[in-house]
Each structure stands twice: as structure tokens, then as C-alpha cells.
Amino acid sequence: MPLKKSCQPEQTQFEWESAGLLAGVDEAGRGPLAGPVVAAAIILDDRRPVPPGLADSKKLSAKQRERLYDIICDQALCCSIAEATVDEIDRINILQATLLAMQRAIAGLRLRPAWVLVDGNQLPRLDIRADAVVGGDAIVPAISAASILAKVHRDRWCAAVDPIYPQYGFASHKGYGTAAHVRALQAHGPCPLHRRSFRPLAGAQP
């Protein structure tokens, strides 16, 4: 269930920075065996300070991410969260699905950015200036904020589907290939939420 919500503290200054609104973009969920890949795009408000504790979502606890999610959405100029589905992942591969989710998130912003910074080394096709920043979730506040929004959204998705497929334990492992998840797959086979194109599931029967 895609979520789009209109949500830049002081940005890291790059010597090639240009004038205009800057959007940070990041994703969550490239590695799991199940569920959508999620991307978030956000334009923070330069007039407001960076929310305390803002950092790469992987370095924060679930409770810290949940707290920051609400602060970020409240203080940002706008934000957008979008997904690429399991079917899209299986059809076009996880990289292309991730870039598709990023395109959707950027398109969902209420304000049009002049420049987009994307975490990593790959860029979606855009008609605006964009740069990839390796490790951007640790050095660009807008990307850090986007990483938090994407991660919280995906974790909430996992919690929401857990009662529908309780035998897999999505709420605990978030779809990743943990030992418990693999045991559940061996016992029950994959469900419609699993990515059949991923190696552990290739050729598996429901």
C-alpha cells in the first residue's frame, strides 16, 4: 500500500551545489526475500535546524527511527514515499525496481526540486539534475531523512502483513533471509509476498 505524504535542515555544502530546492532520496528493502522495495524523497526546510539524532537509518534503533519519522514529516517542506511491488521486482529485477520506486517518490513531491541527491552509485532517469552520493545517508541530511522515512514505511508494511501470513514472521525479520525465515520457507513454501526471482526462491512452489 503505497504511502505518499508531503513532508531541508542545513544541507552539506558541495562545491558543485546549485541554487534551488534540494531533494534527498534513499531506499529500503533491496535485500529482503519478500515485500516491496521502498523509496523516499524529501525536501527539508533550510530555515529549521536538523532534527537531533538524524543519521543513516541503519545506525538507529527502531524506536529512534519512529520518533524521527514524525519529526521529519512535520518539519520538512515536503516528502513522498513510494514502492515498487514484488511483481515489478521479479519482472524487471531489483535494481530497476529500486530506481522505479525512486522515480515515483520524486514525482510525488509537492514541490519540484532543482537538484536531487541519491544515496549510492546509481541514478533513476530524471528530467532534473541528479547526482549519486556514495555513503550519502551519512553525510547529506536530506538523504539521511529519506533513509529513515523509507525504512520506517517498510517496517510498518511488514508489521501490517504479519497477521495475514503469521507463519513467516515478517514482523520480526522484515523479510530478510534469516535462519527463522528460511526455516519457515522450507516448512510452508513461499507466499504471494515473496520475490520468486531471488536465488533462494527461484523455482520454489507455493
Image (tube, rainbow, N blue to C red):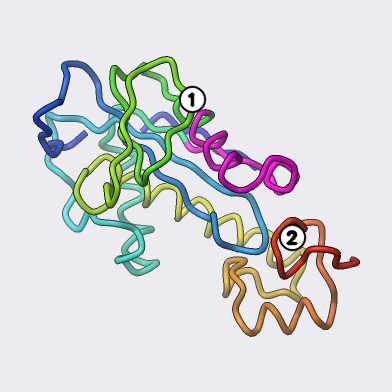
Specify the quadrant of the image occupied by residue 196. bottom right
Q: Amino acid at mark 2?
A: His
Verify whether residue 8 appears in magenta. Answer: no
Residue 73, percent across and down? Answer: 35, 40
Q: Mark 1 and mark 2 in contact? Answer it, CB < 8 Å.
A: no
Verify whether residue 82 appears in magenta. Answer: yes
199, above or below 70, in the image: below
118, above or below 135, in the image: above
Q: Which residue is mark 1?
A: 125
Specify the quadrant of the image occupied by residue 40. top left
Query: Nearest the camera: 206 or 169?
Result: 206
Quadrant where the image shows the C terminus: bottom right
Give the mark toward the camera: 1 or 2.
1
Whether residue 3 sits left or right of residue 197 in the image: it is left
Kindly report the secondary structure that dominates the magenta region of the rendered protein: helix
Query: Nearest the camera: 56 or 109?
Result: 56
Q: Which mark is residue 172?
A: none
Residue 30, percent across and down? Answer: 54, 54
Q: Which residues are magenta?
A: 81-103
Among numbered discs 1 and 2, the one appearing first in the sequence: 1
Whether residue 166 sits left or right of residue 170 in the image: it is right
Identify the secondary structure beneath mark 2: loop
Q: Amino acid at mark 1?
A: Arg
161, above or below 131, in the image: below
Residue 102, percent across and down? Answer: 49, 35
Query: Nearest the camera: 200 or 29?
Result: 200
At a point 63% along the width and 84% down the height, the residue shown is 179
Q: Which residue is mark 2?
A: 194
Residue 33, percent across and down? Answer: 66, 64
